[in-house]
Image: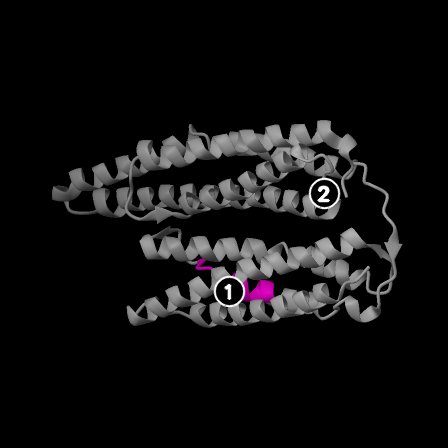
Amino acid sequence: MIHANNRSRMVMFAIIAGIIVVFDLFTIITNIYVAPILEGYGLPDILIYLKTAIFLLLFIMVMIWLKQKEPKLTKTTFKLLMVVGILMIGAYFLALYLYKYMLILDTADIIKRRILLGNPDLYLDFSGLNYRTLMNVLTIFGGFNSELILFAEAIAFLMCVYAVDKMDVVEEKTHVYDSFMFDVVLFPLVSIWVILSFLSINILNFRFDILGSLEIGLAVAGFAAIGSAVIPSFKIYRNRDNECTRSFFISTYRLLFIIAIFSIIIYLALTILNFTFISMNRGTYRFVSSLFTFILSIFILYRTFRILSLENK
C-alpha cells in the first residue's frame, strides 16, 4: 500500500489531473457550442469523452486517498492507471493530428477537383464547405485541445508517472501462495483478449454518424480497459513461484475482475449494436470480434473470481 507520507505528491497529482479535466471539459463545451459543426462526428470528438472519464477517475481516486485516515491503494494499481492516462493523451494527440490532416487533405482535394476543375456554378457551395472545415481546424489549433496544450499535459503527467516509483510503501508481510493460485493461463488469454478488442474498433473511418460514434466510443473504451489488463496478468505469470504480499495478490486479481466486468458490459452493448448494424445492412466482421471478446470476458471473470474466492491469507 502507498504510505500516508506521500500526501504532498498525491496533492500534486490531484492538481494536475484536475487541471486536465477542466481543460477537457472546456474542449467538450467548445466542440458542442463554439466550434463550427461539420457533418457527423470526428474521432477526436469521441475520444475526448474517454480521456475526460479516465482523468476524472484518477482525480476522484486521489481525492478519496487523501480523505482516508488509513489510505488503501497499491502502488502497482495506481501506476497502471497513471500509465493508461499518459497513453490516452498520446492516443488523443495522434487521433487529433490525423483528423486535422484528413480535413486539410479533403479541403485541398475539393479546391483542386471541384472548384478549379469543376462546375463554376458550384464554386460558392464548395467555398462555404471549405470555410467551415478550415474554421474547424483553426478552432482546434487555438483551443484547449491544441497540440501545445496536449504536449504540456503529457510532460506534466509523465513526471507524475515517474514520481510514483519514488513513493514510499507500507511494509507488509509476504506470503507463499500455492502455485495454482497464480493463474498462468491468464496472460495468454489476456493477450488474445487485447487482439480481439482491437479488431472490434472501426479504424477505417475518421467521421461517424450517431450510431457509428457510439460504436467507436464503446470499442475504444473497451480496448483501453482490456489493454490495461496486460500488465497485471503478466505480473501474475511472473510471480507464479515467488512470495508476494496479500495486498498485491488481491489488488492484482481484483483489478482484472473489475476490468472483466467492465468489458462484459461494453462488449455486450457492442454485440447488440453490431447486430443492429446487420439488420440495417451495415454488418461487418466486428460483430464476430465483439461477440468473442464478450465470451472471453465472461471466462476471464470466472477465473479471477474463482481465485479470489480461494484466497485465505
Q: Position of residue 35 (x, y in %)?
A: 33, 34
Mark linked to residue 199: 1
199 is within the stretch colored magenta: yes
Q: In the image, what residue occupies the spot 65% across and 69% down?
A: 189
Nearest the viewer among 67 and 212 is 67
Q: Is residue 137 visible?
A: no
Q: Position of residue 29 (x, y in %)?
A: 38, 33
Residue range (magenta): 193-203
First reached walking from the N terminus: tag 2 or tag 1: 2
The kind of residue on which mark 2 rests is Lys
Q: How many marks?
A: 2
Residue type highlighted by circle 1: Leu
Is residue 153 highlighted in magenta?
no
Residue under label 2: 72
219 left or right, relative to 257: left
Q: In the picture shown, does residue 51 fall above or below 9?
A: below
Q: Is residue 309 left or right of residue 152?
A: right
